[in-house]
Amino acid sequence: MALSGLDIYKLLPKTNCKDCGFATCLAFAMALAQKKVSLDKCPHVTAQARQALESASQPPIKLVTIGSGDARFEIGNETVMYRHEQKFYHPPAIGFLVEDSADEQEISRTVEKINGLVFERVGQRIGAGLICVRNQSGYRNKFLTAVSAVEASSKMAIALYSGDAETMAEAVALCKEKRPLIICGDAASQEAFITLASRNNLPLALTCAGIEEAAEAAAKARAGGVEEIVIHLNEGGLSKRIQDFTYMRRSALKKNFRPLGYPVIVFTEAADPDQELAEAVSYVAKYAGIVIMKNVEREYVFPLLVARQDIYQDPQKPVQVEPKIYEIGKVTALSPVLVTTNFSITYFTVAGEVESSKVPTYIVCCDSEGMSVLTAWAAEKFTAEKIAETLKKFGIENIISHRTVTIPGYVSVLSGKLEDVSGLKVSVGPREASGIVNYLRGWKP
Ligand code: SF4
């Protein structure tokens, strides 16, 4: 069982010396119970208490690092069941399957497509993180050829998937500096894979039929010296896996059951691309550490990456853009001015519509702490006074000659007061961004 804050407090020195950065031992104990701080921060804890507190100071779900350099990513180390309780920390890696049974040209085309799966959304780069090469053919040479081809033509992290330990050892030698994840595809080879992972200090994924088998296999791997373990449950369909992943996370977080405290890797199975996408999004939501897709087409990968980005966004910190005046196109003193908030999605939606209109426009983003227009208005972060203050601070009157600004239709109620406090003429724009193109094309100062 996980220790409560009070259980931990009883074991601390109770001197309130503040050396840990917390005002009291009790505050430190509470933070430790929530896995927000490491026990090492208290230099005064006794050896006896340290031993008792060891379990409370360890992350309930092991942090696993895969890849090296810029391609390196981390999974696991999550602390909550639900995003609204705090936030999710490590977005699952989205990987793509390359089968060694494909011919060289097909592998090369697939890898090229995977390399191009990089997008920009709300000012952030999102993309694929991993290529998984599977020894589907069962032939060693084919697998090694495919691994070499992927290694040479992609900078992404690699996962190697085979049931044969000798084949895997040779494949590891081809890409060891990339710190690949090795996936043991056959329970009979588990011991040899554990030795291989331990010797090379590599993360190891253990393929198991169910969670009991997974707990046993993970304990064996730990005893064999493997620190970074990933679980691969290869039986059951989508709903069974989600049930199992949820059970694993709950056991690790709520019961502090270490043998299941590891991230999971999952492979999509649906043949239909729409269903495969729905399957992958479900795994991202509940609770995969790595999702391996078959489909590499951009129109299917982008929605998956968007879902991941949204789910792993800190709910207490909306994605924001810098509050300032943005110039879209070749603006002049006669260009229209649209006023909005600095919520990223709002800004990029408005900017996209302005670009489509081909009317050069200024967009003034007011600091609304990242809230959207209506939310910010309701929270009094987007008021006439605040907008007027922002327009003055950015010197809009020195930039345009027509003295007219446009506010979103949803806050038309602000127009009169904004005119009074800013001394500018205020137009009311469309309620929805989709109306911006027509509005700008018909706009006159
Ligand atoms: Fe208490 Fe240790 Fe923090 Fe000092 S450093 S306040 S003894 S928890």
Image (tube, grey):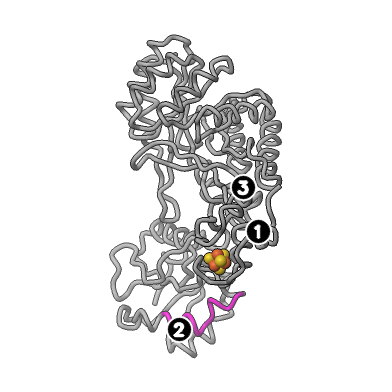
Residue 318 seen in the current view: no
| Residue at the image point whose x is 49% and y is 21% from the top | 193
What residue does disc 2 label?
Answer: 388
Nearer-N-terminus badge (3/2): 3
Residue 383 shown in magenta: yes
The span from disc 3 to disc 2 (Cα, nearest Å) is: 54 Å
Kindly identify the amino acid type of the residue bearing the numbered disc 1: Ile
Answer with mark 3 or mark 1, whichever residue precedes in sequence.
Answer: 1
What is the number of callouts on the image? Answer: 3
Q: Is residue 237 left or right of residue 424?
A: right
Q: Position of residue 101 (x, y in %)?
A: 44, 13
Residue that appears at 51% across and 59% down: 434
The image shows residue 275 at horizontal and vertical percentages of: 61, 32
Choose mark 3 or mark 2, whichever is in front: 3
Q: Residue at x 63, y 39 (%)?
A: 258
Stretch in magenta: 379-390
Q: Residues within 10 Å of mark 1 (few under 14, many from 20)?
A: many
State how far apart marks 3 and 1 are (Cα).
11 Å
Q: Which residue is mark 1?
A: 8
